[in-house]
Image (cartoon, grey):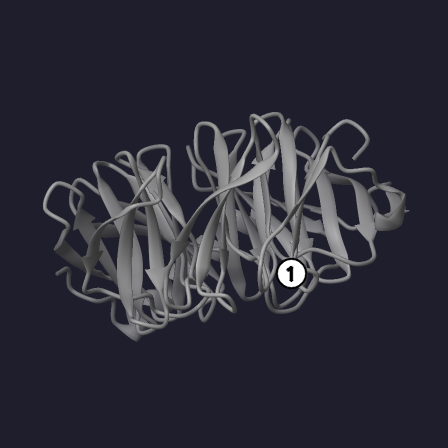
Amino acid sequence: MPTPHTPSSRAFLFAAIALLSLSGCKRNHHAQMSLKSMSSLHPQATFTVKGHPDWMAIAPDAVWVTSSAANIVSQLRASDNRNGATIAVDRPCSGLAVGFGSLWIPSCGQHTLVRADLNTGTVQATIPVGPASSEGGITAGAGSIWIMTSASGLLSRIDPASNTVVATITTPSGSFCPLFADGFVWLTSTEHNALIKIDPSTNQVVSEILVGKNPRFLTYGADSIWTLNQGDGTITRVSTRTGQRLADIAANIPGAGGEISFGFGSVWATVMKKPITRSDASRSAITSQWTGDGGDSIRTALGSVWLTSYKDGKIWRLSPNPL
């Protein structure tokens, strides 16, 4: 386990990073965009699941979605737009990850990590390590599964060959939502308004980059990490190559919940009442925003945008072109 940063060293580090990152940061407050109503959309397909569909993960030929209210994880087949296998999990939460031929499902009910076959949904293993919170997150990369297991900042690294924790990494408190990208594991520290970079070759934090207020969810694309900042409703773009804070996009979507995804040359964010906000990655600017019912989880894959309607128990499959 690495030595934790002291408060004084972290404060000095954040101050130095702030001066460097803000000097090159572009703020987009007045980007032109179109405001549209969700009622005008015509989905390619609509799936219905029990309870409240929430977290999604993309498999080669399907989308998997959790429903903690119904204690299930459901498969949505992309080939025929039909519901597929269902996995019984006690309060699935805190994300889903696809990797090593399996679907990895954090359970808030049992405080465990469930491993299931990606095709059949058959449970392969139950690992006695649980998520830090219902919005704690999980990712696959560098030959491992990574999951936050404590709000104090503990990140667990799991070997899929043995289904055991092989390392526990100390990160800043209030860190969540690990994401593997460009050879590193990235976390958001909601408490410290920072993006955390971890080197899997050493299991050490290598940098902490200031972003918007209370970042939570994040995505990767166009050589950048994009954070959805719940405190001020902005989206921050950070270069994975230089660590520079490139842009703050005024998306005007503050509040709890939500999610963010990258695809089709754009960044897609969702929150309740504003289910879709699309930003052009080449300009770091919002191009369209959709208001109305739906929202809370979004993914881009298999030629479509996948959006949950949490309250209505539906998942919409949408063409990205009219969005």
Q: Is residue 304 above or below residue 175?
A: above
Q: Please identify the quarter of the rendering in which residue 278 is found.
A: top right
Q: How far across and how far down the image is residue 192, in percent?
A: 44, 68
Q: Is residue 268 left or right of residue 8?
A: right
How many labels, in total? 1
Horizontal side of 66 relative to 204 (left or right) equals right
Which of these two is toward me, 244 or 184? 184
Where's residue 13, x and y in %? 36, 60
Q: Look at mark 1 in the image and give the residue it sits on.
A: 310
The image shows residue 141 at horizontal and vertical percentages of: 29, 38
Q: Secondary structure at mark 1?
A: loop
The answer to whether residue 34 is left or right of residue 93 is: right
Q: Is residue 224 visible?
A: no
The residue depicted at 68 percent of the width and 61 percent of the height is: 233
**Toward the viewer: 96 or 152?**
96
Tell me the quarter of the image containing the N terminus: bottom left
Foreground: 42 or 20?
42
Q: Amino acid at mark 1?
A: Tyr
**Residue 309 at x, y percent in the picture:** 68, 56
The answer to whether residue 276 is visible is yes
